[in-house]
Image: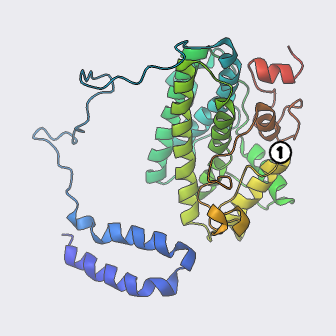
């Protein structure tokens, strides 16, 4: 039987050893995790009911009516959706489709077509994507992300109309090409984002952050009551997803990524540098370890959250995003994650189709 006294002894031992076996950079994270472990025996355990079923959460359903909720302050503008709100939010669906397929396949080995196929609007299935070799904890996180992206697509399409799912390339070959470009030479063996949990989260580092930058950039162009509320909700969850991914990678900041002997920090730095180079609009993408001039209040080198000098989120235009997603540095030349280009009025006009 598990003994809480044994936990205490182990924790005391590690608290004495920790400064000797772990870098100062991760020391605070180490003690945070250790504190949780040391008191784990005090946490009440979930018990099954009399019928042997799993514990039922105490939270009510999303649709539960609470008649005493205070109404929101009446908006200054009550028009739900302005015509000019539609193109940027339809453009955003390109990235949401990429995220949806990436996360669903990574966790389950199937994508949108197996969950809510009508949201694809007849678009082609993604190529090269597959189930990742994830540990069970991260698999659950990625599964949640995947289903969240289904909800994002549904909300966007119901509000502003949908675009056909574009052809999406999530193959190991595409990721290997992207990483090779970031480092300036070919890694041997080629980087495979599906090989293990760490590789998959490095691959994930390449995706949700672009979506949230796009939403920050879109914010100034929206005027509708419903579209502004939609964007706020999307931006919140995209930011949380990116924060979780960066947080996990930060905990492994100095770990070499097998078999390359290149640290997680350098992977993030190289990928961010490449995206800034492709976008051609200054620094809007930062790795997990930065010069102090880019750190919070210019006082830190650590960089769990990428943000500007006032710790506000960066913004990108559709043109910048396409230069990165196409991996060509040119919004008029498709490739990369979208080999046939993005869909919707903005992307097709930039390709000369409209």
The answer to which of 283 and 145 lies nearer the viewer is 283
Quarter of the rendering occupied by the C terminus: top right
14 relative position to 21: left or right: left
344 relative position to 14: left or right: right
Q: What residue is at 60 percent from the left and 52 percent from the top?
A: 201
Q: What residue is at 79 percent from the left and 24 percent from the top?
A: 347
Q: Is residue 14 above or below residue 255?
A: below
244 relative position to 180: left or right: left
Q: Is residue 263 above or below residue 140?
A: below
Q: Which residue is mark 1?
A: 281
Q: Is residue 306 above or below residue 71?
A: below
| Res. 319 image quadrant | top right
Element assignment for label 1: loop
| Res. 77 image quadrant | top right
The answer to which of 343 and 28 lies nearer the viewer is 28
Residue 298 percent coordinates (x, y): 67, 66
Give the residue furthest to the front: 76
| Res. 44 image quadrant | bottom left
Residue 297 percent coordinates (x, y): 63, 63
Residue 86 percent coordinates (x, y): 66, 17
Residue 221 percent coordinates (x, y): 68, 25
Q: How is the image coloured?
A: rainbow
Q: Is residue 218 above or below residue 123?
A: below
Give the residue furthest to the left: 50
The answer to which of 150 and 108 lies nearer the viewer is 150
The residue carrying pointer 1 sits among few (fewer than 14), some (14 to 19) or many (20 or more) residues within 10 Å by Cα, namely few
Q: What residue is at 62 percent from the left and 66 percent from the top?
A: 302
Residue 13 seen in the current view: yes
Residue 109 seen in the current view: no
Q: What residue is at 61 percent from the left and 51 percent from the top?
A: 200
Total marks placed: 1
Quarter of the rendering occupied by the N terminus: bottom left
């Amino acid at each position: 039987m598990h003994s809480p006294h044994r936990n205490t002894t182990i924790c005391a031992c590690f608290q004495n050893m920790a400064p000797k076996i772990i870098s100062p950079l991760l020391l605070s994270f180490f003690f945070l995790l250790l504190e949780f472990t040391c008191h784990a025996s005090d946490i009440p355990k979930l018990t099954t009911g009399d019928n042997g079923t799993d514990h039922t959460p105490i939270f009510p359903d999303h649709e539960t009516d609470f008649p005493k909720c205070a109404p929101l302050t009446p908006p200054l503008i009550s028009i739900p959706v302005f015509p000019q709100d539609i193109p940027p939010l339809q453009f955003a669906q390109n990235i949401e489709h990429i995220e949806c397929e990436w996360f669903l396949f990574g966790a389950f080995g199937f994508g949108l077509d197996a969950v809510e196929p009508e949201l694809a609007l007849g678009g082609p299935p993604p190529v090269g994507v597959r189930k990742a070799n994830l540990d069970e904890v991260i698999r659950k996180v990625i599964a949640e992300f995947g289903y969240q992206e289904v909800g994002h697509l549904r909300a966007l399409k119901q509000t502003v109309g949908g675009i056909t799912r574009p052809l999406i390339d999530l193959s190991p070959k595409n990721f290997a090409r992207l990483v090779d470009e970031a480092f300036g030479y070919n890694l041997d063996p080629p980087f495979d984002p599906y090989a293990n949990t760490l590789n998959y989260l490095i691959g994930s580092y390449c995706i949700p952050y672009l979506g949230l930058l796009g939403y920050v950039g879109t914010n100034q162009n929206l005027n509708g009551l419903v579209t502004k509320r939609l964007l706020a909700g999307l931006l919140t969850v995209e930011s949380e997803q990116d924060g979780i991914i960066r947080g996990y990678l930060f905990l492994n900041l100095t770990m070499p990524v097998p078999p390359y002997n290149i640290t997680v920090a350098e992977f993030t730095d190289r990928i961010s540098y490449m995206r800034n180079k492709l976008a051609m609009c200054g620094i809007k993408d930062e790795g997990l370890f930065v010069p102090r001039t880019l750190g919070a209040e210019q006082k830190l080198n650590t960089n769990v959250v990428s943000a500007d000098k006032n710790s506000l989120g960066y913004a990108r235009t559709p043109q910048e995003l396409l230069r990165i997603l196409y991996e060509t540095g040119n919004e008029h030349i498709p490739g990369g994650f979208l080999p046939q280009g993005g869909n919707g009025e903005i992307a097709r006009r930039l390709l000369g189709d409209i």
